[in-house]
Image: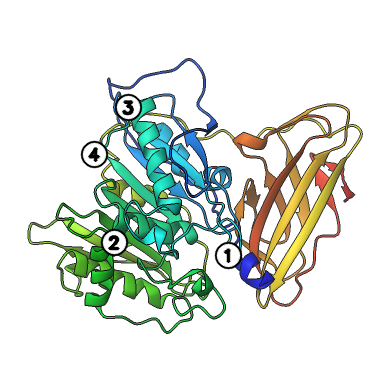
C-alpha cells in the first residue's frame, strides 16, 4: 500500500515560459499583487475539500475560470506552485481555482472518481464541492459561466474527465493529463494501482459502452458537450498509456465521431497529436501522445497548449514580463535543519523534504543545494524549482514559500527515477550554509 501511495503522490512540473499576449482595455488593475488565497465557506462541500484561488491583478469584468487539479498526495497550493497555469492567468486574465482533495481511497488526497455518489450529477462528494467553487467565483468575481474549464494531472486528470461527464452544462472544455475515462473505476477498492481493473493494463470496453457511461451520468441531458484534450506519455506504467485510447473511444462516441482522426501532426518533437473534428470542422477531441514520457505530465509548454485549446489565448490577454529569478537572503546565521524522507519502489521514488530555519533572523528567498546519489534523476517536483535534474541539484523557492521566519518550516519534494540507489543525499546547504539533518 505504501508503494501505491508514493507512486501517485505529489505530481507536479517545472514552471514554463508564458504565452505572448495583446493588451486589452477591459482589464482591471488592483493595487496589490496577486497571490494564492484560501477560500472558506464557498458553498455546499460534501467532499470536505479545500479551495485556493488565484485572481490575477489584471482581468476583464467577466473573466474565464479554470479549475486546475493536482495528483494523489498533492494539494491545490502545490499544483499552483508547480504548474504554469497561474503565470498564464497573469498574462491572459482568467481566474484559477485550485481544489485540494481530501478523499483517501487508501492513498491520500485523491479526487473521488470511484463512488456512486460522484458518478451522477448532483449526487454529492467532490464533484458537488468543485461546482460550488465555480459558483463562488461567479458570484464574488464575476466569473463568466460560459467560459469554465477543467484541467488536472493524474488524479486531477481523471477528475477532469469526470467533471465533463457529470457536469456538461457547467464546463465548456477540459484538458486531462494522464487521466482515465469516466466510470473507469468500479468503486474505492478498485482505485489504482495494484489490483485495479481500470489501471491494471487490461481495461478494454467498446466505444458504445464508454459513451453510454457518460450519457448515464446526467440522464436526459441534450445540450452541448464539453470539448476535451487528452495527454498521455507512451512510457506511463502507473496509469497505462493504453487508457488514452479508451478515453479517445469514450469521447469520440459521445460526440458521435469516428475513432479515425480527421488530422494528425507533430506540434513539436515527441508530441504526436490526433484531432477528431465534427462536420463543421470544430475539433471536439484532441489527443497527445508524448513519446518516451512516463507519469510526469504536464511538462513545459503543455499548459499553454491546454489554454489555447480552451480558446483563451486571444480573449483576455495581459502583457507581463517573465517571472524574475529567485533571490536569496544571506546564509542563515544560526543554522538550518533538513528532514528528508524517501519512499521508493523498483526504478522510482518520491522524496519529501522539510526545510526549517533554525536561525534567529528571517530568510527571504532561499536555495537548497544537495547532491543526488548516482543514478537518480528528478522527473517532477512540487513547491520548488529544481535544476539540474541529476547530480548537484539546486532547489529554489517559489512565490508562496520564499519567506521563512525564525523557526518556520516549508515542505518541498520531488519524484525521481533511479537505477538501484534510492538513498538520500549526504549533505544539504541552505543559501550556502550547511544544514543539520533532522
Q: Are marks 4 and 3 in contact (CB under 8 Å)?
A: no
Q: Residue 269, can we see it?
A: no
User: Label 4 belongs to which residue?
Assistant: 146
Closer to the N terminus: mark 2 or mark 1? Answer: 1
User: Label 2 belongs to which residue?
Assistant: 217
**With 142 as the anchor, is 86 left or right in this view?**
right
Q: Residue furthest left?
A: 279
Closer to the N terminus: mark 2 or mark 4? Answer: 4
Position in image of residue 425 (x %, y %):
81, 60
Viewer-proximal residue among 125 and 201: 125
Viewer-proximal residue among 317 and 111: 111
User: Label 3 belongs to which residue?
Assistant: 142
The quadrant of the rendering that contains the N terminus is bottom right
Which is more foreground, mark 2 or mark 4?
2
Instruction: Give the CA separation, mark 2 to mark 4.
Output: 21 Å
Position in image of residue 28 (x %, y %):
36, 19
Closer to the N terminus: mark 4 or mark 1? Answer: 1
Closer to the N terminus: mark 3 or mark 2? Answer: 3
Amino acid at each position: 500500500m505504501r508503494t501505491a501511495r508514493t507512486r501517485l503522490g505529489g505530481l507536479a512540473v517545472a514552471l514554463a515560459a508564458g504565452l505572448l499576449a495583446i493588451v486589452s482595455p477591459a482589464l482591471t488593475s488592483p493595487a496589490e499583487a496577486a497571490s494564492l488565497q484560501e477560500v472558506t465557506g464557498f458553498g455546499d462541500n460534501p467532499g470536505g475539500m479545500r479551495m485556493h484561488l488565484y485572481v490575477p491583478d489584471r482581468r476583464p469584468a467577466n473573466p474565464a475560470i479554470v479549475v486546475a487539479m493536482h495528483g494523489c498526495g498533492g494539494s491545490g497550493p502545490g499544483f499552483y506552485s508547480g504548474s504554469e497555469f497561474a503565470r498564464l492567468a497573469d498574462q491572459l486574465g482568467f481566474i484559477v481555482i485550485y481544489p485540494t482533495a481530501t478523499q483517501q481511497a487508501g492513498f491520500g488526497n485523491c479526487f473521488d472518481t470511484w463512488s456512486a455518489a460522484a458518478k451522477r450529477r448532483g449526487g454529492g462528494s467532490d464533484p458537488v464541492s468543485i461546482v460550488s467553487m465555480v459558483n463562488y467565483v461567479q458570484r464574488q468575481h464575476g466569473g463568466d459561466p460560459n467560459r469554465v474549464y477543467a484541467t488536472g494531472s493524474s488524479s486531477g486528470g481523471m477528475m477532469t474527465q469526470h467533471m465533463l461527464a457529470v457536469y456538461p452544462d457547467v464546463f465548456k472544455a477540459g484538458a486531462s493529463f494522464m487521466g482515465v475515462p469516466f466510470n473507469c473505476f468500479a468503486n474505492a477498492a478498485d482505485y489504482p494501482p495494484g489490483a485495479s481493473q481500470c489501471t491494471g493494463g487490461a481495461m478494454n470496453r467498446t466505444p458504445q459502452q464508454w459513451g453510454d457511461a457518460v450519457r448515464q451520468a446526467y440522464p436526459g441531458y441534450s445540450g452541448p458537450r464539453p470539448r476535451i484534450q487528452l495527454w498521455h506519455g507512451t512510457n506511463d506504467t502507473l496509469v497505462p498509456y493504453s487508457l488514452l485510447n479508451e478515453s479517445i473511444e469514450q469521447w469520440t462516441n459521445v460526440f458521435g465521431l469516428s475513432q479515425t482522426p480527421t488530422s494528425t501532426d507533430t506540434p513539436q518533437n515527441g508530441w504526436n497529436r490526433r484531432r477528431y473534428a465534427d462536420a463543421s470542422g470544430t475539433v471536439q477531441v484532441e489527443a497527445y501522445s508524448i513519446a518516451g514520457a512516463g507519469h510526469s505530465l504536464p511538462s513545459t509548454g503543455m499548459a499553454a497548449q491546454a489554454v489555447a485549446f480552451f480558446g483563451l489565448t486571444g480573449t483576455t490577454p495581459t502583457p507581463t514580463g517573465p517571472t524574475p529569478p529567485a533571490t536569496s537572503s544571506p546564509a542563515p546565521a544560526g543554522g538550518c535543519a533538513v528532514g528528508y524522507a524517501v519512499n521508493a519502489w523498483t526504478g522510482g521514488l518520491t522524496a519529501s523534504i522539510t526545510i526549517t530555519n533554525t536561525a534567529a533572523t528571517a530568510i527571504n528567498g532561499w536555495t537548497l543545494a544537495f547532491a543526488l546519489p548516482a543514478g537518480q534523476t528528478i522527473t517532477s517536483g512540487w513547491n520548488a524549482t529544481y535544476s539540474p535534474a541529476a547530480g548537484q541539484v539546486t532547489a529554489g523557492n517559489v512565490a508562496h514559500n520564499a519567506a521563512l521566519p525564525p523557526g518556520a518550516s516549508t515542505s518541498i519534494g520531488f519524484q525521481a527515477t533511479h537505477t538501484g540507489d534510492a538513498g538520500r543525499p549526504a549533505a544539504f546547504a541552505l543559501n550556502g550554509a550547511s544544514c543539520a539533518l533532522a
